[in-house]
C-alpha cells in the first residue's frame, strides 16, 4: 500500500512500501507522507487490534492538563507570522539538538543578551532548520514535526535545503488564512481543556478576557507555578517575593507573610478556574518544620546569614507548605522533579531558561515523600501527580506508591521520556503493580501550539499498540482494552487533575 494512502479501519496492509535509498542530506524533493500505521505493531494480528483501538479514540477531544502555551495566544488571536517562529524557535526539543550539532542558538532565532545583536531573521532560521532535517531521524521530535507539517499545515514535501524557501512561503501564506489563526486551530484540534502554566504574581488578565468573551467557548485554565517564590537558593528570590507582595497586597518580609501571600494567590487562581499547582523542585523532599523554626530560618536566609544547606531546607519547607495548602483547598499538586535546570550557566545567562539544557537527575521518592504522605496521603482533599525523568524508579518506587496511596497518581513520561519506546517501557514498568487507573493519562507539556494534536496522537497510537500486545497475549480482552484506552485519554486526566 502506498505510504500516503489512508487505511480503512481493520484493512490489512499486505504490501509495505518498497524501500528507497535515502535522499542526500539537506537536499532534494521528497514527499512528506506520514504512514497511517506509524507506531503500530508490525505483526499483522497485533496491528489489526491496534488499528481498531486507535480508531476508537483518534477523534476524542484533547484534554491538556499541563502545558506551556500562553493564554495570551488565544485571548488576542493574533495570526502566526511564519513557520520559524511557530515551529522552530520556541521548541527546545529542536533547538537543543541542532545546538548539539554546532548550530549557534542565534541562528535559530534566540536572542543573545550578551551582545545585544539581533538573532537570525525567520527565513534564515527556517533555512537552517530545513538544511538539518535529517538530524531528527529516529527522534520523537521528527514524528511530531511530520504530523504538524502534514496534518496541521498541509505540507506535502519534506524540508530540505532545496525546499526551504518554497515551504517558508507556502506556510507563511497559509498562516494568513482565517482557519489558521490560533482560535480556529484550537477548535480544529478539538481541545476540550487546556491548562497553562502561570506565575503566582500574574494577574491572569488573559484568562479573564477569555472568560468574558462571548465569542469564545473554549476552556483555558491557569496552573499555579510558584517555583521562583519557593526557591530560596536562587539569586532572584528576594525580587520574586517583592513581586508576590505587590500582586497579593501582603507583606512578604517574614515567613507568615509569605505563606499568607501564597494562599492569597492560590485563591485568586482558583477563582479563575485553576485546579492544579505545578512544581519543578530538584527533588521531591519536603520539610515540615514548626512555625518558630521556619520563621527563624526565613529571617536568616532573607538576611543572607544562612548557609546554602539552610536555604535548601527553607525551599523544602515552602514546598511542604504547598502540600499542606493542597490538602486544604483541593488543588492537585503536580511534581515535576528530578531535573537539573539550566545545566549550562553560560547559556542560561545569555539566552534565558527553557532553552534546552535541563538534564535529568537520579530520583528518589520513597523516603522523600514519606513525610508528606504520612500527613496527607490518605486525606481525601489531597491529590498529587508524580512525574520523573528517571526510568529506574517507575517500577521500584512510583508504581508501589500509587498502588497504595489513594492520593498518588502517576504522571505520564515527561521531557526526555515522552517518546514512543519510553512510553512502552513506562506501561510495562507500572501496570502490573498499579494497573491503568492510577495513571494520570497523557500530558503534552509543550510550548509549541501546533504540536498539541501531534503529541496526543502519538500517545494514542502508542497506547493502542501496547494494549494490542496485551490482547494478543490474552492478558486482557479487546473489549476491556477499548474501555481502557478511552479512559486513559478522557477519564483519567480529568480525574487526576480534577477537571
Image: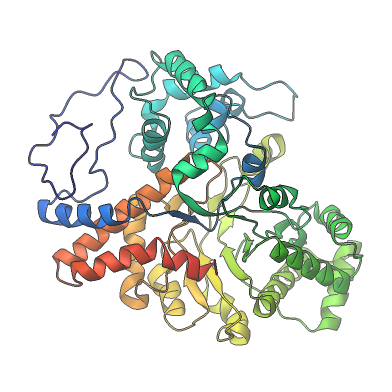
Q: Toward the viewer: 10 or 259? A: 10
Q: Tell me if residue 24 comes above or below residue 430 in the rendering.
A: above
Q: Toward the viewer: 305 or 257? A: 257
Q: Residue 292, position in %: x, y?
A: 86, 82
Q: Tell me if residue 330 comes above or below residue 444 in the rendering.
A: below
Count the numbered circles shown: 0
Please identify the quadrant where the N terminus is shown. top left
Q: Residue 432, position in %: x, y?
A: 30, 75
Residue at image point 41% right, 65% down:
392
Please identify the quadrant where the C terminus is shown. bottom right
Q: Is residue 21 visible?
A: yes
Q: Residue 212, position in %: x, y?
A: 70, 51
Image position of 373 (left or right of 394)? right
Colouring? rainbow
Residue at image point 26% right, 52% down:
55
Q: Tell me if residue 277 comes above or below residue 193 in the rendering.
A: below
Q: Residue furthest left?
A: 14
Q: Is residue 419 visible?
A: no
Residue at image point 58% right, 66% down:
334
Quarter holding residue 5: top left
Quarter holding residue 221: bottom right
Residue at image point 70% right, 34% down:
350
Q: Residue 491, position in %: x, y?
A: 42, 67
Amino acid at each position: 500500500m502506498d505510504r500516503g494512502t489512508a487505511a480503512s479501519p481493520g484493512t490489512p496492509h499486505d504490501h509495505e512500501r518498497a524501500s528507497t535509498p535515502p535522499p542526500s542530506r539537506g537536499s532534494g524533493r521528497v514527499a512528506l507522507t506520514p504512514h497511517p500505521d506509524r507506531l503500530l505493531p508490525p505483526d499483522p494480528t497485533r496491528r489489526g487490534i491496534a488499528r481498531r483501538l486507535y480508531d476508537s479514540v483518534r477523534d476524542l477531544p484533547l484534554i491538556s492538563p499541563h502545558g506551556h502555551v500562553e493564554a495570551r495566544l488565544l485571548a488576542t488571536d493574533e495570526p502566526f507570522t511564519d513557520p520559524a517562529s511557530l515551529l522552530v524557535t520556541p521548541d527546545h526539543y529542536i533547538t537543543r539538538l541542532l545546538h548539539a550539532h554546532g548550530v549557534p542558538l542565534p541562528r535559530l532565532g534566540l536572542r543573545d543578551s550578551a551582545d545585544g545583536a539581533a538573532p537570525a531573521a525567520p527565513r534564515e532560521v527556517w533555512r537552517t532548520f530545513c538544511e538539518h532535517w535529517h538530524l531528527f531521524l529516529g527522534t520523537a521530535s521528527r514524528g511530531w514535526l511530520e504530523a504538524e507539517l502534514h496534518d496541521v499545515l498541509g505540507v506535502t514535501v519534506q524540508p530540505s535545503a532545496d525546499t526551504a524557501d518554497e515551504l517558508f512561503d507556502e506556510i507563511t501564506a497559509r498562516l494568513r488564512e482565517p482557519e489558521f489563526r490560533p482560535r480556529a486551530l484550537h477548535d480544529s484540534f478539538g481541545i476540550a481543556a487546556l491548562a497553562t502554566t502561570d506565575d503566582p504574581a500574574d494577574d491572569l488578565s488573559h484568562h479573564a478576557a477569555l472568560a468574558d468573551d462571548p465569542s469564545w467557548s473554549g476552556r483555558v485554565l491557569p496552573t499555579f507555578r510558584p517555583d521562583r517564590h519557593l526557591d530560596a537558593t536562587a539569586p532572584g528570590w528576594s525580587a520574586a517575593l517583592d513581586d508576590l507582595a505587590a500582586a497579593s497586597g501582603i507583606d512578604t518580609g517574614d515567613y507568615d507573610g509569605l505563606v499568607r501571600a501564597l494562599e492569597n494567590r492560590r485563591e485568586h487562581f482558583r477563582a479563575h478556574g485553576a485546579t492544579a499547582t505545578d512544581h519543578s523542585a530538584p527533588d521531591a523532599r519536603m520539610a515540615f518544620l514548626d512555625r518558630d523554626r521556619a520563621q527563624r530560618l526565613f529571617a536568616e536566609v532573607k538576611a543572607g546569614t544562612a548557609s546554602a544547606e539552610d536555604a535548601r531546607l527553607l525551599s523544602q519547607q515552602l514546598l511542604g507548605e504547598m502540600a499542606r495548602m493542597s490538602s486544604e483547598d483541593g488543588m492537585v499538586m503536580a511534581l515535576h522533579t528530578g531535573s537539573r535546570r539550566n545545566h549550562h550557566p553560560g547559556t542560561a545567562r545569555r539566552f534565558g531558561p527553557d532553552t534546552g539544557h535541563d538534564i535529568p537527575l537520579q530520583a528518589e521518592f520513597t523516603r522523600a515523600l514519606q513525610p508528606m504522605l504520612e500527613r496527607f496521603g490518605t486525606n481525601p482533599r489531597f491529590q498529587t501527580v508524580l512525574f520523573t525523568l528517571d526510568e529506574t524508579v517507575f517500577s521500584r518506587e512510583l508504581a508501589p506508591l500509587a498502588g497504595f496511596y489513594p492520593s498518588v497518581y502517576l504522571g505520564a513520561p515527561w521531557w526526555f521520556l515522552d517518546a514512543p519506546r519510553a512510553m512502552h517501557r513506562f506501561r510495562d514498568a507500572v501496570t502490573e503493580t498499579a494497573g491503568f487507573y492510577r495513571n494520570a493519562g497523557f500530558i503534552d507539556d509543550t510550548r509549541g501550539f501546533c504540536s498539541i494534536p501531534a503529541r496526543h496522537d502519538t500517545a494514542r497510537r502508542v497506547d493502542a499498540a501496547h494494549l494490542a500486545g496485551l490482547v494478543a497475549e490474552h492478558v486482557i480482552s479487546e473489549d476491556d482494552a477499548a474501555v481502557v484506552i478511552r479512559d486513559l485519554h478522557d477519564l483519567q486526566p480529568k480525574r487526576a487533575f480534577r477537571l
